[in-house]
C-alpha cells in the first residue's frame, strides 16, 4: 500500500469538482492512509459532509465555532497530525485567501497553522485561472513552497473548454507519493562503472530492479547540422533530461545505451553500458539503428534538428554584401523510423517539445511515430525544458492514461517516466501471454 501509516488532511472547497474529492479520499484510504477532511461552507453546497465522514470514519471539520465533539482545537491539533495537507479542489477564492494570509474559516485557518507539505489542486473556469490576480496568488504560494498541481485542459462544467479542470485523482495521488518520498532516505549501494571501474559513483541497489535484464536505448541532446565548417543549425538542448533518464533506467537495473548529440561531457552519466557520441541527425539515426535489435525500450529525448542544409558548403562562407539563401531539407525522423519497424514487444517513448497546443500536438506525434507514450514539455517556459535543471511534463500513454508531473528536478521527472516504461513493459508481457 502506497500510503500505509500516512496521514492526510484533505481540504475541500466549493466547486463542481468537489465530488472528485470523495474519489480522492477513497483512493487515499484504499492505499492505507488515514484521512481527515476540512470543508469550506461553500463546499457543502456541492457535497455533504456525511459523505466524507462515512469514507474517513472521522468527523469533518467545517465550523470554527461549532461546539467540540471532543475537546480539541482542530486548526492546531490537525495541523500537527497530518503528514500533508492537500486542498482539492482549491477555488480561486480560497487560493486568494491563502496567498493573502486570510484565516476566516476552518480550512484557511488550518492552512496557516500547518507546517508540513501543502498541496493545492485548483479547479475553476479558464478565465478565472488565467486572471492576473489568480496567476499572482499561485506564484505567491509557489514561492512559499506550496506544491501546485496545475489543472488540466478539457471541457469544463460551465460548458466552456479550456484549462481549469481538476487534475485527475491519479495525478494528485502520484504527486502526493512523490512529495512524501522526498522525506524518505533511500538505501544506497556502491556500483562500479562498467568501463572505468570507478567505484566512487553511488546509486540505488539495482540487481533485482524492475528493468534488470532489459536494454534501454536513449537519444539525448541536440544535433548540429553544419552549414559550413564553422556554422551549424542547432537548439539549446543540454542533454540533462536524456542523461537523467539514462541514470534512472540504470538505477532500475537496465543496461543503458546512450546516443547523444554534442553536450558538455560533465553531464554524461557513468552508469551507461555505452555512450555513442554523434553530431548530426543522420549519425544519430545510424547509431540507434545499430542498437535496434537488442533494445527492449527506446526513449527519444533528443532535440533532433528537423532540417539540415541541402549541401554543406566546404569552405567558410564569406560576406559578399548580398543576402544569403540557404536551402534546407528535412532530416530523417529517428523516432518515426524506429516506430515503423519496431517489434510488438518493444516499448518506445518519445518527447514532445511544444510551445502551444501542447496536448493536441503531443497526441498527434505519439500516433505518427507509433510511440507507446509521449512526454510533453512546454519549451516556451524558461524554468523548465531546455537547459534547465527542472522539468514539468505531462505523460500521455497510448491507452488514454495521462499523468501530470509538476515542476521538479529532471532526475525525478526521469523516475516518473521510467515508472511508465516499467508499466508498459509489463503490459506488453501480459499481452504476449494471452
Ligand atoms: O536536453 P535538455 O536541455 O535537458 O532539454 C530537454 C528537452 C527539452 C530537449 C527534452 O525534454 C525534450 O523535449 N526532447 C524532445 C525535443 C524534440 O525534438 O521534440 P519534438 O517535439 O521536436 O520531437 C518529437 C519526438 O521525435 C522527440 O522524441 C524527438 O526526439 C523525436 N525526433 C524528432 C525529430 C527527428 N528528426 N527525430 C526524432 O527522433
Image (spheres, grey):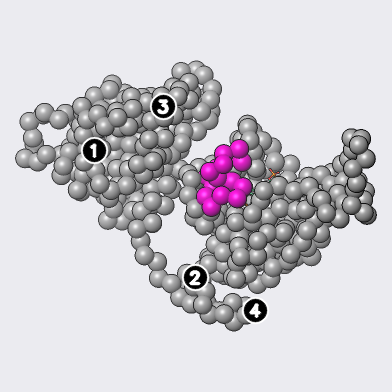
> Of the numbered discs in the image, which one, if any, rests on residue 112?
1
Residue 185 location in percent, x, y?
Answer: 36, 65
* Residue closest to the eye, 68 or 163: 163
Q: Quadrant of the N terminus?
A: bottom left
> Of the numbered discs in the image, which one, if any, rests on residue 195?
4
Say if mark 4 contacts mark 3, CB within 8 Å: no
Q: Residue furthest bottom?
A: 197
What segment carries the magenta color? 378-398
Residue corresponding to mark 3:
134
Residue 356 location in percent, x, y?
Answer: 63, 32
Q: Secondary structure at mark 3?
A: helix
Q: Is residue 287 left or right of residue 326?
A: left
Q: Mark 1, mark 2: which one is toward the viewer?
A: 1
Q: Is mark 1 within 8 Å of ligand 1?
A: no
Residue corresponding to mark 2:
203
N-terminal-most mark, 4 or 2:
4
Category of crowding for the residue at label 4, using alpha-carbon neighbours closer than 10 angstroms: few (below 14), some (14–19), many (at least 20): few
Identity of the residue drawn at 52% across and 57% down:
411
N-terminal-most mark, 1 or 2:
1
Category of crowding for the residue at label 2, using alpha-carbon neighbours closer than 10 angstroms: few (below 14), some (14–19), many (at least 20): some
Identity of the residue drawn at 37% across and 26% down:
92
Determine if residue 352 is in view. yes
Identity of the residue drawn at 40% across and 66% down:
186
Amino acid at each position: 500500500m502506497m500510503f500505509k501509516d500516512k496521514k492526510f488532511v484533505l481540504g475541500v472547497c466549493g466547486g463542481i469538482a468537489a465530488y472528485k474529492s470523495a474519489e480522492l479520499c477513497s483512493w487515499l484510504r484504499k492505499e492505507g492512509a488515514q484521512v481527515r477532511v476540512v470543508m469550506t461552507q461553500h463546499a457543502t453546497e456541492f457535497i455533504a459532509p456525511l459523505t466524507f465522514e462515512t469514507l474517513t470514519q472521522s468527523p469533518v471539520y467545517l465550523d470554527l465555532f461549532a461546539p467540540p465533539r471532543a475537546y480539541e482545537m482542530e486548526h492546531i491539533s490537525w495541523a500537527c497530525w497530518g503528514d500533508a495537507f492537500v486542498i482539492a479542489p482549491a477555488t480561486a477564492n480560497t487560493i486568494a485567501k491563502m496567498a493573502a494570509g486570510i484565516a476566516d474559516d476552518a480550512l484557511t485557518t488550518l492552512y496557516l497553522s500547518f507546517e508540513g507539505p501543502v498541496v493545492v489542486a485548483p479547479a475553476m473556469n479558464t478565465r478565472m485561472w488565467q486572471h492576473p490576480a489568480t496567476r499572482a496568488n499561485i506564484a505567491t504560494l509557489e514561492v512559499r513552497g506550496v506544491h501546485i498541481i496545475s489543472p488540466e485542459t478539457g471541457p469544463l462544467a460551465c460548458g466552456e473548454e479550456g484549462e481549469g479542470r481538476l487534475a485527475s485523482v491519479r495525478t494528485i495521488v502520484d504527486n502526493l507519493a512523490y512529495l512524501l518520498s522526498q522525506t524518505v532516505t533511500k538505501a544506497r549501494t556502491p556500483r562500479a562503472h562498467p568501463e572505468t571501474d570507478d567505484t566512487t559513483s553511488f546509486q540505488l541497489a539495482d540487481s533485482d530492479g524492475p528493468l534488470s535484464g532489459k536494454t534501454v536505448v536513449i537519444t539525448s541532446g541536440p544535433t548540429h547540422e553544419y552549414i559550413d565548417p564553422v556554422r551549424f543549425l542547432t537548439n539549446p538542448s543540454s542533454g540533462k533530461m536524456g542523461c537523467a533518464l539514462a541514470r534512472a533506467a540504470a538505477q532500475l537495473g537496465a543496461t543503458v545505451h546512450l546516443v547523444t548529440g554534442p553536450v558538455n561531457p560533465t553531464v554524461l552519466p557513468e552508469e551507461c553500458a555505452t555512450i555513442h557520441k554523434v553530431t548530426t541527425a543522420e549519425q544519430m539515426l545510424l547509431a540507434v539503428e545499430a542498437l535496434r535489435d537488442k533494445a527492449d525500450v527506446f526513449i527519444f529525448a533528443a532535440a533532433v534538428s528537423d532540417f539540415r542544409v541541402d549541401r554543406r558548403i566546404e569552405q567558410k562562407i564569406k560576406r559578399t554584401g548580398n543576402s544569403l539563401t540557404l536551402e534546407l531539407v528535412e532530416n530523417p525522423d529517428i523516432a518515426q523510423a524506429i516506430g515503423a519497424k519496431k517489434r510488438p514487444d518493444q516499448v518506445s517513448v518519445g518527447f514532445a517539445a511544444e510551445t502551444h497546443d501542447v496536448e493536441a500536438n503531443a497526441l498527434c506525434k505519439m500516433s505518427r511515430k507509433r510511440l507507446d507514450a509521449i512526454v510533453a514539455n512546454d519549451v516556451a517556459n524558461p524554468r523548465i525544458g531546455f537547459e534547465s535543471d527542472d522539468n514539468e511534463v505531462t505523460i500521455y500513454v497510448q491507452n488514454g492514461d495521462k499523468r501530470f508531473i509538476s515542476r521538479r528536478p529532471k532526475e525525478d521527472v526521469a523516475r516518473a517516466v521510467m515508472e511508465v516504461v516499467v508499466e508498459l513493459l509489463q503490459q506488453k508481457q501480459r499481452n504476449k501471454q494471452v
